[in-house]
Image (cartoon, rainbow, N blue to C red):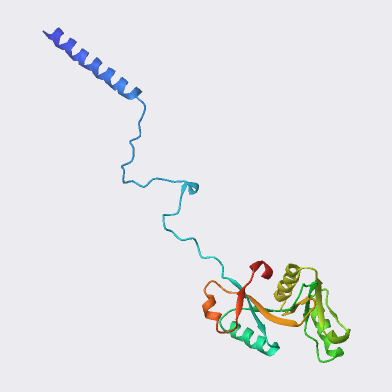
Amino acid sequence: MFLRAAIVILTCLNLGAVAWWVAGSQPNRTLPPPPEAPQLRLVAELKPAAGAKPAAADGVCLRFGPFAGPAARTGAAESLAAIGVQATPFEDRSGAASGWDVFLPAQADHAAAVALVDKLKTAGVADVFVMNDGRNANRIALGRFSSEAGARRRVDELRAQGVAPVIEARGNGSKRIWLDARLPASIGQARVAAIAPSQVLDCSHLQ
């Protein structure tokens, strides 16, 4: 009787050992996350939600004018500056332009022009000299360019140095004067419409 009980106990122990070994040899399996759990995504896999709007682009570029004269253009420039719009003077002549000049207006006399050139050179402005020919006498020349884009880059360079030059196209016909500006995204065309007539300008001309 005792021997039969011992055999039963040993059999149960062996069966338990076998079951433990079989269970331990099975690979661990990760349970899938519940359906409501957030899933990881690569940044490249993210797509904008339907109807989402892209980030607002930079404001539009405009050419204001032409103005009847320098006083009218100055008044418009001051009105634009009052609302945070910085404008660059531009002058051209009707007909095909043969080039573009960047300059400061003529000074009162030759001595004043020379003094201003010396001041500009001391401030680090290069390629600057006094013009002595005819109607442009005592004008401060800051560069002559074959393309408007090149002249615009020179204007940007000078503005960064604290100089506010004028850009003028060379060509035949009567001179016209304008203002070019890039409107901040927060200022729409409707807000500046009352200041002066304008037309959309390729922003690359201001770069």
Which of the pair 54/119 is nearer the observer?
54
Q: Quadrant of the N terminus?
A: top left
Q: Position of residue 133 (x, y in %)?
A: 88, 84
Please say if 8 is above or below 128: above
Q: Taking the image as drawn, is residue 57 in sight? A: yes
Residue at the image position 21 percent from the left and 13 percent from the top: 11
Would you identify the image quadrant in which residue 6 lies?
Answer: top left
Would you identify the image quadrant in which residue 2 lies?
Answer: top left
Q: How many marks?
A: 0
Residue at the image position 64 percent from the left and 68 percent from the top: 203
Q: Residue furthest right?
A: 133
Residue at the image position 42 percent from the left and 58 percent from the top: 51
Q: Residue furthest bottom?
A: 108
Q: Position of residue 204 (x, y in %)?
A: 67, 66
Which of the pair 56/195 is nearer the observer?
195
Which of the pair 64/9 is nearer the observer?
64
- 200 on left or right of 125: left
Please say if 23 is above or below 193: above
Q: Position of residue 190 (x, y in %)?
A: 52, 78
- 33 on left or right of 85: left
Would you identify the image quadrant in which residue 145 lies?
Answer: bottom right
Q: Quadrant of the C terminus?
A: bottom right
Q: Taking the image as drawn, is residue 207 in sight? A: no
Q: Position of residue 62 (x, y in %)?
A: 61, 74
